[in-house]
Image: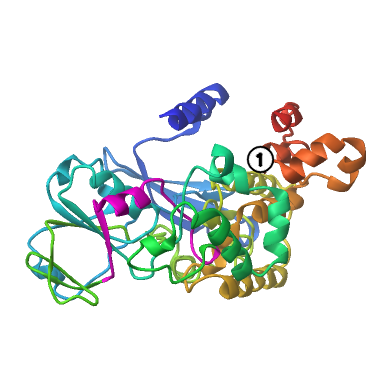
Amino acid sequence: SELHEFFMSNATEKGGLNHIQYNSEVVEVKRAADYDETGRWIVSVKNTLSGEVTSDTYDGVAICAGRINVPKWPSYESQVKFKGKIIHSHSVKGGAPYEKKNVVVVGMGCSGLDAAAEISSVAKQVYLSTRTGAHVLNRVGPDGLPIDYALARRYITFLIDLLPANLLSWLLETVLIDPKASSNLYAVKPKFHVLSKDPVLNDHLASKLLSGSIIQKRDISKFTENGVLLEGESSVTEAEVVIMATGYPWKFPFLEEDIRTEMENQLTLYKCTWYPDLKHSTLAFVGFFLPFGPSFPMGEMQCRWVAQVFAGNLKLPSKETMMDDIKKRLEINEQRYAPCSKQGVRVDYTQFLVEIAELIGAKPNFYKMLFTDPQLWFKLIFGPSVSYQYRLQGPHPWEGAREAIMK
């Protein structure tokens, strides 16, 4: 894919591939014997070809294992009686295996809708099972622009910070979403506003519902031998395959028990990056957030911050200050979002970037820019919130950043 080619070309050009150790599984990350004095970690790695385990000591460790790797499996009444196939959306690789079959897809997130839309082209019938429904955004936004390119703009960020979330959600639903595909099309109406859950994007659901190739249903009540019984229905919905598009728990089996328990249960992280109970800032988590907006720029910003802290150029605040920040984010998110076990790591795209950019000195000086470069100022306020703006200054600036923004 184009994205893969981009990653590989950059890694090759910068020599990054030389620093990757392949066929390796991290089995343990633990504090070294001298951790209290040095902050160092012992990392044990198993060679997946030979089975040999080796250990080395490191001054810093960044956990970048990804948040979409361990499927979450729900359990339903009489599930063991089902004679068909139950898989997770993580394992769906094309629609061919589902040709002329009745398929139930459980979950109305992005992966569930992608699986349902693709499979419906060849399946006999696809049923989309959901507990709460969802407002579905098209990837194509106003004027034919990508939806995030059109909406992720700083002046809109001001509205998000100023207006009540429910009011802004109502505006988005009324002006942007419903005119293209009204939620009245759905058998299960969305229970929560668009800004109260993870964003759901799909360009095909509305047409699939209209054509009948996808039929929306409520949650599964129980399994039978040849299908499922859905809430509010008395007859069995026959199915040969059930696909669980039910998300992913975040697991860290290689961490020490005290850290692992906290991370898997509470995700107590300062700005989604640092565990505040550690004595030294030598263990970082990158990419473990639930974003309303593009993930890659946010992960890049985390990496820049982690690199500066590991290099000793920046220090973290006190534990008390970090805990106050964590509690504040949690309180705000609990007011805005539907109940969720990962409430403390929900973030908005521009706001999160600005938070960290300010810490590393990469936040643009808008007041100064208004007088010295008003064209650039206008572009940053009203144009797309591209990540080039955080290369205008700070660590590792890019001389081509302004030109890229203006284009």
- Where is 224 relative to 307, above or below? below
Question: Is 317 covered by the magenta stretch?
Answer: no
Quadrant assignment for the C terminus: top right
Q: Position of residue 363 (x, y in %)?
A: 77, 46
Which segment did they paint magenta?
195-219
In this rendering, position of residue 343 left or right of residue 167: left
In this rendering, position of residue 75 left or right of residue 197: left
Q: Position of residue 267 (x, y in %)?
A: 51, 66
| Nearer the observer, 19 or 96 | 96
- Where is 223 relative to 66, above or below? below
Q: Quadrant of residue 109?
A: bottom left
Which residue lies most toward the right here? 371
Q: Residues within 10 Å of mark 1 (few under 14, many from 20)?
A: some
Can see residue 398? Answer: yes
Which residue is label 1 attached to? 387
Can see residue 34? Answer: no
In this rendering, position of residue 88 left or right of residue 55: left
Residue at coordinates 66% horizontally, 70% vertically from top-left?
164
Q: Which residue type does callout 1 highlight?
A: Ser
